[in-house]
Image (spheres, helix red, strand yellow):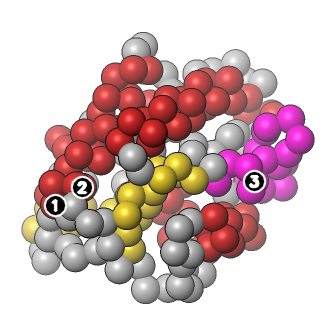
Amino acid sequence: DAIFVGDSRTEGFMLYSGLKGSRSFTTVGLTVSEVFNKKTVTVNGQKMTISDALATQSFSKVYIMLGINELGWVYPEEYQKQYGKIIDRIREINPDAQIYIQSILPVSAKKDAEGTYINNERIRLYNDLLLELAEEKDVAYVNVAEAVSDESGNLMEDASFDGEHLVPEYCKIWLDYLKTHTIEGMNA
């Protein structure tokens, strides 16, 4: 009865964590605005937006992780606003669903040092915005980043093949973290 919404990182999680019995709406490169305006998933043979696809499902929990693809946005507040619209839409579809905002996972120190917009300082800023949003919208914030971070707040070096996406072992660590840090836990 759980649905996961996210980008390529969540796709990897769904493939490699060992989670059973949950559905996902994921797309490589997905952004918060594309949840509403890009037909990226197929339900019953019909291509639709994730927003519309959610309306076709029954669920009691939704786990969202979006943000790595938005780190280059000029206005971080727009990211927060669009994310808020996703929460509002989920509540419109299913007012009783438990919504979990998952923190954006950090990148490795090597990836961080590349000097692009994908860096841990920016990720921390966006995670602060997500924490504010969780409080404003009265939804759960789950800091999954802490499960895969080293003492400096970087993604552990052995956690990823490219500094950004998790290897299967760390997808399992992510799942274990969700099982022990969500309100009802999870069934796997």
Q: Which region of the structure is painted magenta?
A: 144-161
Going by the numbered disc 1, the residue's amino acid type is Ile
> How far apart are labels 2 and 1 at the CA level?
5 Å
Specify the quadrant of the image occupied by residue 107: top right
Verify CB contact (< 8 Å) between mark 2 and mark 1: yes
**Residue at image point 15% right, 54% down:** 92
Identify the main secondary structure in magenta.
loop
**Which residue is labeled 2 in the image?**
90
In the picture of the structure, the residue carrying the numbered disc 3 is: 148
Three-letter amino acid code at the position of disc 2: Ile
The alpha-carbon separation of the residues under discs 3 and 2 comes to: 28 Å
Q: Secondary structure at mark 2?
A: helix
Q: Is residue 3 visible?
A: no
Tell me, for residue 93, which label it has, or none.
1
Amino acid found under the numbered disc labelled 3: Val
Residue that sits furthest to the right in the current view: 151
In the rendered image, residue 156 lying in the magenta stretch gets the answer yes
Q: Is residue 168 above or below residue 76?
A: below
